[in-house]
């Protein structure tokens, strides 16, 4: 018995060592500790060492990316690399080569990275590909490269490797929620920085909700003058949704700050998708402008501080309210480059409409049979408006009720059914189900975790997520643009807590959305993750470490 146990133990150890060897030194694609896992990589002998003599050479139209590369490496190395347009082959060089002809093979976002003892070359069809190649290069360097201060005594060695890489999905998103707890501009920037390292390319910002309106709209200044001040709205909140710190929860972004953030994100190949909620989650807007609510006279007679408890937090979908929200969207369109504009659409208590005589009359005049159709009518007003301005509406899956607007994209959050229905009807979808992508949910036993809204979304579950529902045909599956992780903010009031809820789960999601599904292996992911968190350590990211194991 004892001998058998010993043999078994030995063979387990051998198997583990073999796995480790494959993970670290061999394997079809797992030669490095890069997250998300590249499509293909082939290890070679030796390494390339970056020194002050190394030149960065932009070939094609690659200058902006070469400037960003120099900028990214300089703080930790303590010297900026010299940029040049050409260098003799024998010189130590990092070449960024832009060649549109590579698009057929690598797509818009793919890249090839070739590291030999003599040079590093990144090739791509588009600048996004060069940027992602640079993100991989940063991960191949020692973790100290992520330091904002000069690090002495480190050889900036990159192991020789040849990587070919491109993403599985075009929508690789995260959502943040400054409506519930305002997030300072600086914290949004830091969030974007870490997203970019994981090759995310969409940041949905939930700018408006019952608890606050966080985006300046010039035509309706009251939205932020009144609607961004949580001090009175919070009075009516259940104690736990005040946040964990009890601090003032007010704040908003000026249009200038928004423009800055849009640029900041775009420089990192991240598109900010603005979310302006309607027709529900609009308590802050209704407090500011009672005429868009169901009972304006009742609210108008109250001081703003008393209006929150007295409002139904759902818009009255009159034509004038639709015009009001279109005015808002008109300014939003001017501020954001995103083709997709998110109008929320979720969790509308349309019973309030059912009970309102004025809404009954409105439905009759619009020839609508029920309140579901009224919901759909209102969303269609936004859809037509956005389409007329060359943009596309995206909303939570409740926008399916009463009939989906012609141009709409569906974000499926209440499971995957909404996504399946929409894809079958020929609409594009983004998968964001609570079951796997709600990062405001618990990631471990609630008694050992900071207070969260509920749920159970541990790291392994995120990693196991498959964004293409099995029920879709291959043709329908093409409508799945990708997926997104949600950091709803009811219980998240600090950057550190947000980081704790985001990482490492977002690292797992990044791999789900970027890497080939057949390469996904949780145990190997954990091996790479243990190295990856050293980068997060240097970046000062407060990730949750409990799942890393040994
Ligand atoms: C949602 O979580 N209500 C979209």
Image: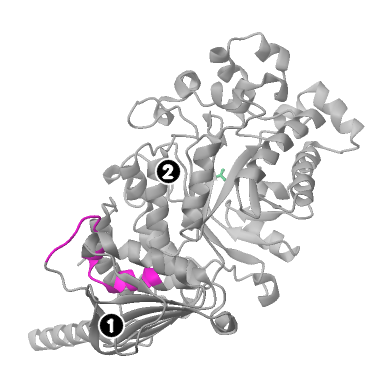
The answer to whether residue 241 of the structure is visible from this angle is yes
Q: Position of residue 194 (x, y in %)?
A: 37, 56
Tell me if 338 is positioned left or right of 457 in this view: right
**Residue drawn 44% across and 34% down?**
182
Name the quadrant containing residue 290: top right
CB-based contact (under 8 Å), mark 1 and mark 2: no
Q: Is the CB–ligand 1 distance for label 1 below 8 Å? A: no
Q: Is residue 74 above or below residue 104?
A: above
Residue 249, magenta (yes or no): no
**Residue drawn 73% across and 31% down?**
324
* Span of residues in magenta: 134-152
In the rendered structure, find residue 292 and report the number of the disc placed on it. Answer: none
Q: Could you say whether the residue bearing mark 1 is in a helix, strand or loop?
A: loop
Q: Could you say whether the residue bearing mark 2 is in a helix, strand or loop?
A: loop
Q: Which residue is mark 1?
A: 92
CA separation in Å, label 1 and label 2: 54 Å
Q: Position of residue 97 (x, y in %)?
A: 46, 79
Q: Which residue is mark 2?
A: 454
């Amino acid at each position: 018995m004892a001998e058998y146990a010993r043999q078994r133990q030995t063979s387990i150890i051998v198997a583990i060592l073999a796995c480790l060897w494959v993970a670290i030194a061999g394997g079809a694609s797992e030669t490095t500790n890069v997250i998300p896992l590249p499509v293909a990589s082939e290890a070679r002998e030796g390494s390339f060492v970056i020194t002050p003599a190394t030149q960065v050479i932009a070939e094609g139209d690659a200058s902006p990316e070469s400037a960003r590369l120099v900028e990214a490496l300089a703080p930790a190395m303590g010297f900026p690399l010299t940029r040049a347009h050409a260098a003799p082959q024998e010189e130590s060089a990092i070449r960024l080569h832009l060649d549109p002809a590579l698009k057929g093979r690598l797509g818009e976002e793919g890249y090839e990275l070739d590291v030999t003892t003599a040079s590093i070359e990144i090739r791509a069809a588009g600048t996004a590909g060069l940027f992602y190649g640079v993100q991989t290069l940063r991960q191949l360097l020692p973790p100290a490269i992520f330091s904002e201060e000069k690090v002495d005594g480190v050889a900036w060695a990159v192991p020789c490797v040849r990587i070919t890489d491109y993403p599985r999905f075009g929508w690789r998103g995260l959502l943040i929620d400054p409506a519930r707890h305002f997030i300072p501009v600086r914290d949004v920037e830091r969030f974007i920085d870490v997203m970019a390292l994981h090759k995310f390319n969409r940041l949905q910002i939930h700018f408006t909700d019952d608890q606050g309106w966080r985006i300046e709209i010039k035509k309706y200044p009251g939205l932020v003058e009144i609607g961004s001040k949580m001090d009175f709205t919070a009075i009516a909140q259940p104690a736990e949704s005040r946040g964990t710190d009890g601090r003032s929860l007010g704040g908003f972004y000026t249009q200038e700050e928004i423009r800055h953030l849009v640029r900041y994100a775009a420089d990192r190949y991240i598109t900010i998708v603005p979310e302006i909620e309607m027709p529900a989650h609009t308590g802050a807007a209704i407090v500011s402008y009672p005429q868009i609510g169901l009972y304006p006279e009742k609210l108008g007679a109250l001081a703003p501080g008393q209006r929150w408890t007295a409002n139904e937090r759902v818009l009255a979908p009159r034509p004038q309210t639709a015009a009001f929200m279109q005015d808002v969207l008109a300014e939003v369109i001017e501020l954001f480059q995103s083709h997709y504009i998110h109008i929320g659409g979720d969790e509308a208590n349309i019973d309030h409409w059912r009970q309102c005589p004025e809404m009954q009359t409105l439905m009759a005049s619009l020839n609508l049979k029920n309140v579901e159709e009224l919901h759909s009518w209102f969303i269609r007003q936004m859809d037509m408006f956005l389409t007329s301005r060359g943009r596309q509406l995206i909303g939570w899956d409740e926008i399916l009720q009463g009939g989906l607007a012609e141009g709409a994209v569906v974000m499926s959050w209440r499971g995957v059914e909404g996504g399946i229905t929409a894809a079958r009807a020929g609409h594009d979808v983004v998968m964001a189900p609570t079951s796997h992508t709600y990062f405001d949910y618990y990631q471990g036993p609630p008694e050992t975790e900071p207070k969260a809204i509920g749920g159970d979304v541990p790291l392994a579950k995120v990693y196991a997520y498959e964004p293409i529902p099995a029920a879709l045909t291959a043709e329908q599956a093409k409508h799945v643009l990708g997926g997104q992780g949600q950091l709803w903010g009811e219980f998240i009031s600090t950057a550190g807590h947000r980081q704790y809820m985001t990482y490492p789960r977002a690292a797992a999601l990044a791999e789900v959305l970027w890497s080939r599904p057949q390469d996904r292996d949780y145990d190997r992911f954990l091996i790479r993750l243990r190295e990856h968190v050293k980068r997060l350590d240097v970046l000062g990211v407060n990730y949750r470490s409990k799942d890393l194991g040994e």
